[in-house]
Image: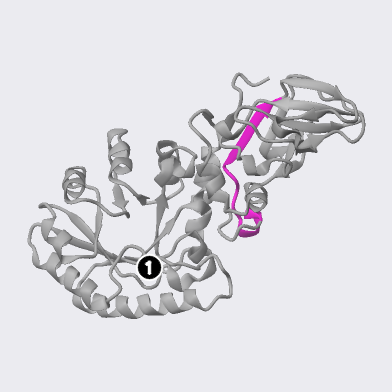
Amino acid sequence: MLSERAVARISTDAISRNCAHLRSRLAGGAELCAVVKADGYGHGALQSARAARDGGATWLAVATAGEAVALRQAGIDGRVLVMGALTAEEAHALVQGGVDVVAWTPGFARSLASDARVHVKLDTGMGRLGAKDPEEVRAVAAEVAARDDVELVGLMTHFATADERGDDYFPAQLARFTEFVEGMRSEHDGLVCHAANSAATLRDPASHFDMVRCGVGIYGLDPFQADPADEGLEPALSLESWVASVKRFEPGESAGYGRRWVAGESTWVATVPVGYGDGWRRGLSGDCDVLIRGCRHPLVGTVSMDNVTVDLGADTDVEVGDTAVLIGEQDGERILCEEVARRLHTINYEVTCGLTQRVPRGYS
């Protein structure tokens, strides 16, 4: 039996192997930047950062100033890039820790403290951060480069549809950025140009430039929402709980809030102590499976904050204390995070990011 109600088991070796695999697919000597924002997509930022470095990642990226500070305070050295929007005060604080920042407006560039390392961002079609006008980005880069006390390090963009194979938008974004890179390199030496997320990295080597920024892929999650094994990736996270109760149900008896499930025939039902308070979403009510003793059993009734109920069938050898696997593999059967995401009509990394702090992470 588990010592906890539920635990997310993380294989740091799998993260390292995924990073090594992704590096093996990079073109032209491109470097791997491992994205460890949002607590490493729910896997643990510090542990993921160390594992990624062991797998050959030479850069780390996060979204917020606080995430970068936490890495530095934990002793994580090397290159760290904050990709998100920052206030001038946050940018000043990050400079002290040698953290790279992103700029796309002249005002922000002028506000940067001495010794700042700066990447400028062109919005080629994501429509969020970055300047849409290449001339604006060129002007920001020129302003940074003109200062003796700051360093123009990189040029970046971000793809909106790289995970939609066969679309026309990704190639158009890539073409716009490629043209801009060529012009900028003629004006500024030594730029680190980067654009590719995990999907782009796997989809088109032309997107690799000098560095790729892989997030979902390093955790063994498929950016195309299919089977990670198809891309040579190994899921790093499994979610386990245990059987706390086994009860006989007769026809007409119900389990869970609202009586959304009523037994149509005699059956056995297990209660497993995990629920939406742990990040196992209520939207999975009556619409997912749980592995117990290597067999799939349907979750029945409403997912509550702390428990779910599972139909074991008319005959069962399941006992209190048996391990229940919600994500992962058991005795040759497996439930991928991608399967859970499809049932929720979402993406795999929303599932892992959604696991709450009530679920302890166990590392191996």
Answer few, some or many: residues within 10 Å of disc 1's Cα (few below 14, many 20 plus, some between 14 and 19): few
Q: Position of residue 15 (x, y in %)?
A: 51, 44
Residue type at numbered disc 1:
Gly
Give above or below for 19 relative to 254: below
Give above or below for 101 relative to 141: above
Q: Which residue is mark 1?
A: 127
Residue 108 shown left or right of residue 16 in the figure: left
Give above or below for 323 relative to 150: above
Magenta region, residue range: 227-242
Q: Secondary structure at mark 1?
A: loop
Residue 93, image quadrant: top left
Q: Is residue 279 magenta?
A: no
Residue 286, image quadrant: top right
Q: Nearer the viewer, residue 212 or 26?
A: 212
Residue 143 shown left or right of residue 266 in the figure: left
Q: Which residue is located at x 50 percent, y 59 percent?
A: 24
Q: Position of residue 354 (x, y in %)?
A: 52, 41
Q: How many marks?
A: 1
Q: Is residue 229 magenta?
A: yes
Colour treatment of the image? one colour
**Residue farthest toward the front in the current orientation of the protein:** 258
Q: Quadrant of the N terminus?
A: top right
